[in-house]
Image (cartoon, coloured by chain):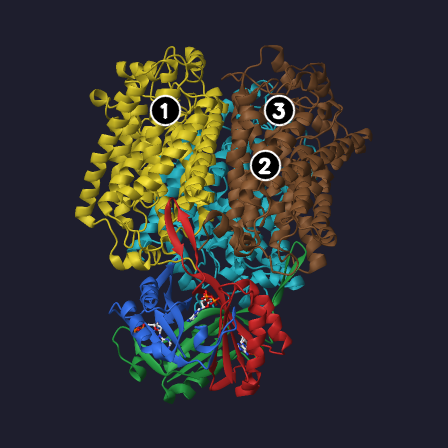
Chain colours: A brown, B yellow, C cyan, D blue, E green, F red
Amino acid sequence: MKTCIRSITSVAALAAAWAMVSMTTALPALAQAAAAAPKMDSGDMAWMLTSTVIVLMMTIPGLALFYGGMVRKKNVLATVMQSFAAACLLSIVWMVVGYSIAFGDGGALNAYFGGFGKMFFAGMTKDGLFAPLLITESLFAVFQMTFAIITPALIAGAVADRMKFSSFLVFITLWLIIVYAPIAHWVWGGGFLGADGIMDFAGGTVVHINSGVAGLVAALVLGRRKGYGTENMAPHNLVYTVMGAAFLWVGWFGFNGGSAGGANDSAAMAILVTQICAAAAALAWMFAEWMTHGKPSVLGIASGAIAGLVVITPAAGFVDPKGALIMGLIGGIVCFIASTGIKRALGYDDSLDVFGIHGVGGFVGAILTGVFAVSWIGGEGKSGLLEGNAAQVWIQLYGTFATIAYCAVATFVILMVVKLFMGLRVDEQTEVEGLDARLHGETVH
Amino acid sequence: MKTCIRSITSVAALAAAWAMVSMTTALPALAQAAAAAPKMDSGDMAWMLTSTVIVLMMTIPGLALFYGGMVRKKNVLATVMQSFAAACLLSIVWMVVGYSIAFGDGGALNAYFGGFGKMFFAGMTKDGLFAPLLITESLFAVFQMTFAIITPALIAGAVADRMKFSSFLVFITLWLIIVYAPIAHWVWGGGFLGADGIMDFAGGTVVHINSGVAGLVAALVLGRRKGYGTENMAPHNLVYTVMGAAFLWVGWFGFNGGSAGGANDSAAMAILVTQICAAAAALAWMFAEWMTHGKPSVLGIASGAIAGLVVITPAAGFVDPKGALIMGLIGGIVCFIASTGIKRALGYDDSLDVFGIHGVGGFVGAILTGVFAVSWIGGEGKSGLLEGNAAQVWIQLYGTFATIAYCAVATFVILMVVKLFMGLRVDEQTEVEGLDARLHGETVH
Amino acid sequence: MKTCIRSITSVAALAAAWAMVSMTTALPALAQAAAAAPKMDSGDMAWMLTSTVIVLMMTIPGLALFYGGMVRKKNVLATVMQSFAAACLLSIVWMVVGYSIAFGDGGALNAYFGGFGKMFFAGMTKDGLFAPLLITESLFAVFQMTFAIITPALIAGAVADRMKFSSFLVFITLWLIIVYAPIAHWVWGGGFLGADGIMDFAGGTVVHINSGVAGLVAALVLGRRKGYGTENMAPHNLVYTVMGAAFLWVGWFGFNGGSAGGANDSAAMAILVTQICAAAAALAWMFAEWMTHGKPSVLGIASGAIAGLVVITPAAGFVDPKGALIMGLIGGIVCFIASTGIKRALGYDDSLDVFGIHGVGGFVGAILTGVFAVSWIGGEGKSGLLEGNAAQVWIQLYGTFATIAYCAVATFVILMVVKLFMGLRVDEQTEVEGLDARLHGETVH
Amino acid sequence: MKLITAIIKPFKLEEVRSALTDLGLQGMTVSEVKGYGRQKGHTEIYRGAEYAVNFLPKIKIEVAVTSAEVDKAVSAIATAAKTGQIGDGKIFVSAIEHTLRIRTGETDDNAL
Amino acid sequence: MKLITAIIKPFKLEEVRSALTDLGLQGMTVSEVKGYGRQKGHTEIYRGAEYAVNFLPKIKIEVAVTSAEVDKAVSAIATAAKTGQIGDGKIFVSAIEHTLRIRTGETDDNAL
Amino acid sequence: MKLITAIIKPFKLEEVRSALTDLGLQGMTVSEVKGYGRQKGHTEIYRGAEYAVNFLPKIKIEVAVTSAEVDKAVSAIATAAKTGQIGDGKIFVSAIEHTLRIRTGETDDNAL
Ligand SMILES: Nc1ncnc2c1ncn2[C@@H]1O[C@H](COP(=O)(O)OP(=O)(O)O)[C@@H](O)[C@H]1O
Ligand SMILES: Nc1ncnc2c1ncn2[C@@H]1O[C@H](COP(=O)(O)OP(=O)(O)O)[C@@H](O)[C@H]1O
Ligand SMILES: Nc1ncnc2c1ncn2[C@@H]1O[C@H](COP(=O)(O)OP(=O)(O)O)[C@@H](O)[C@H]1O
């Protein structure tokens, strides 16, 4: 309990408050409600229901299309299949054990791990609230489920065109349990990072650094695609990619806005800064590319928008519109450099730039949150470097490095185990002929 | 009036309560509100507005794409046109007479038929509530309109590639008036099935059994496609189908969640079980196919997800997550068998498996609702077989057979009448060359 | 202040009331709330958050797909790029200065112009309401931002296949600042048209007449496409167009429903009439085409639906369902004639019929609002011709002509300036080979 | 050796293929083409602007055969592809001077 | 009989078709091809990776004509397809030994 | 002059193109075709209904060369396109009687 309360008062983001049972000061509006027995708020319910809908829409069809448009035509169905199957499989894994590890009470080990007490949603009642929020636990659990779906699904982009479908399913199952759920617990579920005061409104570390680093590890373990660097691997239909980017964008309003936990002023400000940051990063990437390569590309502006959305994710409840504007411009340019120059220089084949966008963008966002956080947005004590609180930058750095280290090691181990038992990569013939026909027995005609 | 009240106390699902004017016990929260003059609840309004948006999205673009991707390229536009035109035409038919038949007061005949008193939304005021719900009648009417759109639109899948567009328009108009609206009245509008205690939260009988049976009848009446069984009729672009499945899925949260009538705990639990059941059925279908045919197909997993959504539709307000999990697994496998083996064995050409998924899935869901319903979810008295209430299974069976019988006969008669006056099927030349060019004068280039 | 209050009492549409600081009679519900210190309403917040999401979805992916499907394959990426880039760029322009001009206080010039006091959202607090609405100013600003995005983005359809991307970006930036923001101020922001009592619920003049007229001017200034009238310029993929129309349609519920400012009875009635009018216009266009050209086309019904949505936009809070039905039928036929016969007769090349649908539809809608407005919907004093208030038609005419005149002149001047400095049209080679490859270095494979 | 090039209606492909297989001909190459001929196309209408679609979808089959097999092959194709209605298509025969199977290096008749 | 195969720029198709129709030639077969030649392609850049698009879209027209018509047909195509800029394409003429109209069974010159 | 027509596996296109470029051959025309031969296709399954996809995607390359260059070109293609596995494809050589470069009006060998 002590840990919990410490976590709240220090984090004081609603996001971080979710796991808490009661609270006293940091959130006046909610505190008021909590004075009496808190009652479900139908407006908060309405917005969180909607947020759940649109965050699911980020994965299907959003991510499916975003990735599907970028691969070659022979692999498009296999690629959309990965997102769709992830949505199905991870829903069940979340119900069985993921939710428990992330948001359960781990007892003595609670700093690291939520335990198994909430497996199969044990203890959930129909109208029980997820205090201090004014929404039911069932709604909180399904809202968080959509986060647990998209995070592993994002990794697919790094291994596109060459990973076995069966191995992919096993990998994401293990990864959700071993990597995602514990880290979600650390930050949002009452674990040590939340307690130490990391600011991560909607998942800069939990979702984006996490999936980005896992993507990089996976790309390195699997190796480059056959023909990488020599064959034409140009995206076959960027219309799909633009559609996907659009659904990711609009769904992100539920991702960041829903992380406010209700239909409140924090949610509204979160979507305003989300919009500004995404737009700024998209323009930054577009103009950077225009100046360096001579043409503004569709893939570039779409990638930049996603980069901006990643960058604002940890910051959405802590920064103001001007901060968001600057974060977007910085994030767009840094991710552009990471996904083009640096990637080429280093020579790894992160097919659809999961690391360059989510990993790097998540890192930039986490650090800049520590710089640009202002207390009139995030609440008392939620200040960043620009308001004189240099310590926050260190907390952010420490939190991200903890995440990176654990994620990289655990991902590597999981991949090696899967490789040992069933292999990771399709055979050469399949890679040449295309995954659609060989793995799924279907093609686009 | 008496019938009405009996209907409520026995059904006590909000869904079934919609048509009622007042109520006493079954719904404590609402009852409280009803004590004073009930006031519109802005949170409930917000969620029902959103639900309306996303249920419409199920038909356009959801169903349009789901079906459009499955036909051959020469018929894709004709197929998306059917969904789009259904959305337009049925909106008007609903306003003119459908709403009245479904939710009006039929006087002496009210057990079967809502009468013509609410034609053109007669009697609707701007701020009048649809008691006992805390939303306005205008919102209730447009929310229900989206159900009245998708149900007939679903039938199009059974007659894809060969039905005349003009005949299709006439058919769905008559079908909405003669089949859909009365059955909606029976179950939700104060009619005899609701009174007898059938549990149908969001339309297992009204929407899915209904459209599935009608599809089967239509497929039989129209006969098989030319070249069925010999020519390659492979889906031309399953990316569209996956997109369509995704929009159906996310929209279904409005379908099932909105059937709670507001942003309440019932809505939240409904979307949680919806997600679990859809995911479980998708996996069940995928693995069943993988084991029997050697490859997990994109079309398979998408079909399974829809099957799961169908199965949970009647149950969404009555079962808990574990029940939903089991229902999904059963439903996915049964629909897989129905849409593959059984269909082939019987030899009818239900082109896109409306019967195999919606008919069979709706039936399975209706029966299993009677098995898995638990009173801590649905409220007192809403128990199924597993809680010892074997009678509920019989009520469910009786309700579904009433629906099947009436629907099959009425659909057949309507089709025969349309056939007599204008024919049902395109000429052979059109079928060979493609409906797009010949019926609509357009092709995909 | 005086102007403001006059504007409210005479306009008394919530839409027009948005910019106001206090109010007395016209809106009883809100007035009540205003008596005490008004408090944020979570239900209203929830619906306006949702509306923001879905209005953004109208542009990306809605408009991108609607337009992208209608061009030839060689220009599809350039076309979707225009919508996407508009969403990015205009978000920033709105933050920098657009919002201030539209909804700021222009002091002595307030009848015409909102001034620069709210640049970069100056003065916005986290929880400050946008009185008399019960939502925060941050939410109001981002909701309105989505309107400021789609309006200039619509113009792209008139100049498709031939405008330079760089010039397009500069043009829409200037146009937002010089044309859109001031006109929004005139009607909704406390300016003279609102004060004079124009009824424009969600943007018939501000959005549609405005973009339609600008489109016509731009089409005339740029000249026809090379090969216009001789080469085959048939839409390459109407599946995209249907998808785009569907997202425009469902998003329009946020456009019109959100213009009620909250989750209230006005929002509900607005989406009901929106649905009716869109459906009626789609059918009207389809049958008109069927009778005159022998076939009902997919492009036709989709165009008709959009026309109906345009027509109902100014009227959504003022007319009843029957009025909406008639308005839809009239609007569908008029826009059909405008986009086919008249366009061909006059010979201008408004590639995707921005003028024929948005300009003409917006005009028809504005005038018919003055005819069909009924006070039981819009509130006391909000009557149209059919309730004996012939004056309203004149006010509507006067308002639309003020908009048309200013918009046409200002658009022409902006285009000429851009032409002078950087040219407007791509070179011939680019037009022949396609904009995708030459401007953006990408193609659909 | 001869190259037989046949332009046929798309839905006749399966029949032609099995007619050739029945003759023991193991290989062919197929492409999607558009044909212009006596058969008239249809009209597509977009918002009142009409476009004549003069070119109709056809399938082009190319089969290389030994000189001895030519006549049988031509008449097999002709029979299988015939509907008797306008637009059935054409068959052209021309000479091949040299043939090579890439996999094995076999040449001429052996390579077919 | 001869087979004229012309590789042309796509947007010249209509002009070539009407030039041939003016000569009284009723039939032709068209396909979408990609050409590689002196005309250089463009470069596509995707997140910094550049791909040279060496192959440019072209249209291939195949027309079978009687020997008497060859010269007129070739020069009609050449005139209609010419822009004078690099990439205009090529015309090849080769011999056809035998022709058959599938619908009627007519052969050789009668089948064209 | 001769026309070399090669049917190859799609992913061999780049290698074949550069082999020809190395010989100094500047032009070629490429199309996407479907091939039927000894190599068997795969099966696609849709809700339990199986469809045999008999035709496999191939690339057809057409290169017109002078008679002197034929042999070099054929063997360059053969070498570049070879994987040694079934389905590698075929090369056909036939005569061209006349060639014209549309842009300049040059003919025959000069037009290549
Ligand atoms: N002279 C020709 N050269 C090349 N292809 C031709 C020629 N004439 C006809 N074709 C091809 O044959 C197809 C059928 O020809 P058409 O004149 O329409 O009917 P039919 O074969 O019954 O005479 C055409 O669509 C075209 O593809
Ligand atoms: N030797 C050749 N064999 C076959 N096709 C050729 C040959 N040379 C050129 N082509 C075709 O002709 C097109 C135009 O040739 P190119 O050299 O680019 O310009 P030009 O025709 O002006 O000399 C090429 O894109 C290619 O399709
Ligand atoms: N007789 C033929 N005429 C035309 N094309 C042929 C012929 N035989 C084979 N082909 C083409 O060559 C391709 C490869 O032939 P196949 O028999 O599969 O393998 P291989 O070339 O190794 O003998 C086929 O897919 C087909 O496109």
State yes or no: discs 3 and 2 in contact (Cβ < 8 Å): no
Q: CA distance from mark 3 to mark 2?
A: 16 Å
The residue type indicated by label 3 comes to Ile
The tag on residue B368 is 1
Q: Are marks 2 and 1 on the same chain?
A: no
In the drawing, does residue B37 fall left or right of residue C157? Answer: left
In the drawing, does residue B193 fall left or right of residue C17? Answer: left
Q: Position of residue D50 (x, y in %)?
A: 37, 63
Q: Which quadrant would residue A153 be assigned to in this image?
A: top right
**Mark 2, mark 1: which one is toward the viewer?**
2
For label 1, count other residues whose C-alpha is less than 10 Å away and answer few (under 14), some (14-19) or many (20+): many
Disc 1 secondary structure class: helix
Residue shown at the point (72%, 40%) measured from the top left = A327
Residue C155, visible in the rendered structure: no
In the drawing, does residue D99 fall left or right of residue C123? Answer: left
**Quadrant of the image for the C terminus of chain E?**
bottom left
The tag on residue A172 is 2
**Quadrant of the image for the N terminus of chain E?**
bottom left
Foreground of the two, C410 or A85 = A85
Q: CA distance from mark 1 to mark 3?
A: 31 Å
For label 2, count other residues whose C-alpha is less than 10 Å away and answer few (under 14), some (14-19) or many (20+): many
Name the subunit of mark 3: A
The tag on residue A101 is 3
Name the subunit of mark 1: B
Q: Position of residue F4 (x, y in %)?
A: 51, 77
Q: Which quadrant would residue C444 be assigned to in this image?
A: bottom right
Is the CB atom of the residue marked by disc 1 within 8 angstroms of ligand 3's nearest atom? no
Q: Position of residue B377 (x, y in %)?
A: 44, 17
Foreground of the two, C274 or E109 = E109
Q: Position of residue B116 (x, y in %)?
A: 25, 29
